[in-house]
Amino acid sequence: TVVDGLGRIMPDARAGDYKALVRLAGQGAPTAAPQLVNALKKAPDVSARLAIATRIADRRWDVRLVNGATVLPEDDAMDGALARLSTLQTRTALMQRPVTMIDLRNKGRIYLSPAQGGTARKIAEAARS
């Protein structure tokens, strides 16, 4: 289904005709979509790499990137989490690193899960360079 800018489902619209729109999943995703779309507009580096956003328990989003990594943002601070991720992308190309998870839920820290074959040390060294 296609959701409009106000979070309303458009029953007559075909999803295949709107391939540039953000893909959403999860209970409550349509009504929470406008806030997510506005946050993504402010973070074009992230938006360009987004595969799907999944609404979790109708209270927060998980974001899957095209490289397969899952981003776990802070519960009620999608704008801030995407801004942090965008800054990290600019500084370290984080979204191109061999990681499966980028956990931004702790405001003071970022937790990464390395992809198979990668190590935390390799990721940290690459981020410093």
Image: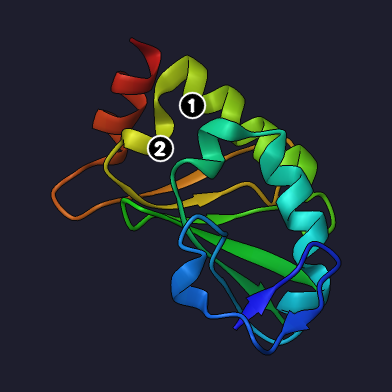
User: Which element is circle 2 on?
Assistant: helix
The residue type indicated by label 1 comes to: Gln
**Which circle marks residue 95 in the picture?**
2
The residue type indicated by label 2 comes to: Met
Q: Which residue is mark 1?
A: 89
Q: Is residue 10 left or right of residue 101?
A: right
Q: Is residue 118 above or below residue 11?
A: above
Q: Is residue 67 above or below residue 19?
A: above
Q: Is residue 83 left or right of residue 50?
A: right
Determine contact: label 1, label 2, CB under 8 Å: yes
Q: Is residue 38 above or below residue 68?
A: above
Evaluate whether residue 28 shows in this view.
yes
Q: Earlier in the sequence, mark 1 or mark 2?
A: 1
Q: Name the residue nearer the viewer: 66 or 128.
A: 66
- Residue 74 spot, x, y in % from top left: 74, 53
Q: What crowding class fits label 2: few (fewer than 14 Cα within 10 Å), some (14-19), or many (20 or more)? A: many
Q: Residue at x 66, y 32 (%)?
A: 84
- Residue 78 spot, x, y in % from top left: 76, 50
Using the rendered view, name the quadrant where residue 98 is placed.
top left
**View extreme (top): residue:** 129
Evaluate whether residue 58 shows in this view.
no
Q: What crowding class fits label 1: few (fewer than 14 Cα within 10 Å), some (14-19), or many (20 or more)? A: some
Q: Residue at x 43, y 20 (%)?
A: 92
The type of colouring in the image is rainbow
